[in-house]
Image: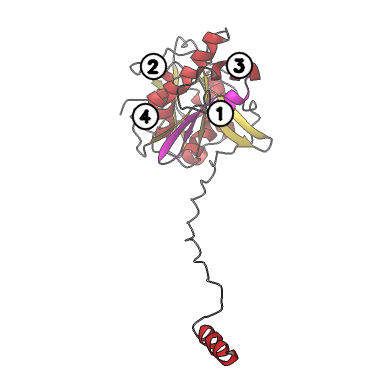
Amino acid sequence: MRALRSLALLAWLVGCSCEAPVATPPPIEPAPPVEPPLTLPSVDAELPEAVPAITISVRSDRFEVGNRALVGSWPEADRQIVGQMRPLGDADYPIVEREVDDASDALVVPGLREAVRAVVAVETARATVVHADGTTTIFAVRADADVHFARIEAALFAAGVTGLARPRLVVTSPTGERELRLSSPDGELEGAPAPSIAAPRVETTVELSPEGLTVHRGALRLGSGCGAEAAPGDAAAPTIPTASLSVRAIETCLDAIDPHVAITFSAVGTMRYADVVDVLVAMVTRHPVNLRAALR
């Protein structure tokens, strides 16, 4: 019997690997791509500190609209009261965030106005239920330094036609995030609000192009230094050529007109946003600045 048991055990050992089964590891899912942060233009000027606001973030391929920072600045009681109005299934409300995929340089971007309106509606709801003093008209634009300025104009226009009239361009500085405080688009576009700064009797317009800065005082195109009309032979030349553009040159030019005059500014849409910001900073620290965009 003992021999039979030994043979049976031997037969079982021969047919058994005697190793625990090895579990097949689950497939490794690729990590989602990490979204790079916005590379805001950087300036050295002393501008007001950036404050929470309805925000339109401009990237090369999309627009992101949201109010997360603004809602975070509300009193807790406001967040709770307005939160009770949340639509079914919207657990984040009153935080509203929308994304609009669009890589064009068009002034009117399909869906962008509706995205801004959805965020503005939260401010309207808050004003209704907590008896606030109206709704904010301030909004912030945060944009990658290399995007075309035309995309900034699209953001400004979408905000303007929904009632937001006080744009802030957020930039970085050695002391943190700062903002350029501008006026709304000047109302030449259908549906845009009137400017928040009364137009001067004789309009001063400044246009930035790859060739330089061109300044008009009314119908007159100003020559170098802005002290007089451009000579007939220089009628097509910019007031300040690109090679001569500097903060000092812009300040000297505009101060020759009036140190307090309001400026209506425009830029060629294909220009790099950071390059436009450099010129705006030189103007906004000394003059009220309106923005003008053209239908295209």
What residue type is disc 1 on? Answer: Arg
Q: CA distance from mark 4 to mark 1?
A: 49 Å
Identify the residue shown where x is 58% and y is 10%.
Answer: 130
Quick check: is 51 in the magenta stretch?
Answer: yes
Q: CA distance from mark 2 to mark 1?
A: 26 Å
Between 22 and 293, the one nearer to me in the picture: 22
Quadrant the C terminus occupies: top left
What residue type is disc 3 on? Answer: Asp
Quick check: is 183 in the magenta stretch?
Answer: no
- Determine whether 18 is above or below 165 in the image: below
Between 277 and 236, the one nearer to me in the picture: 277
Identify the mark nearer the N-term, 3 or 1.
1
What residue type is disc 4 on? Answer: Ala
Q: Is residue 188 left or right of residue 84?
A: left
The residue at which mark 2 appears reads as 192
Q: Residues within 10 Å of mark 4 (few under 14, many from 20)?
A: some
* Whole-percent x, y for residue 34 in the image: 52, 49
The residue at which mark 3 appears reads as 78
Identify the mark nearer the N-term, 2 or 3.
3
State which region is magenta: 50-74
Residue 109 position by quadrant: top left
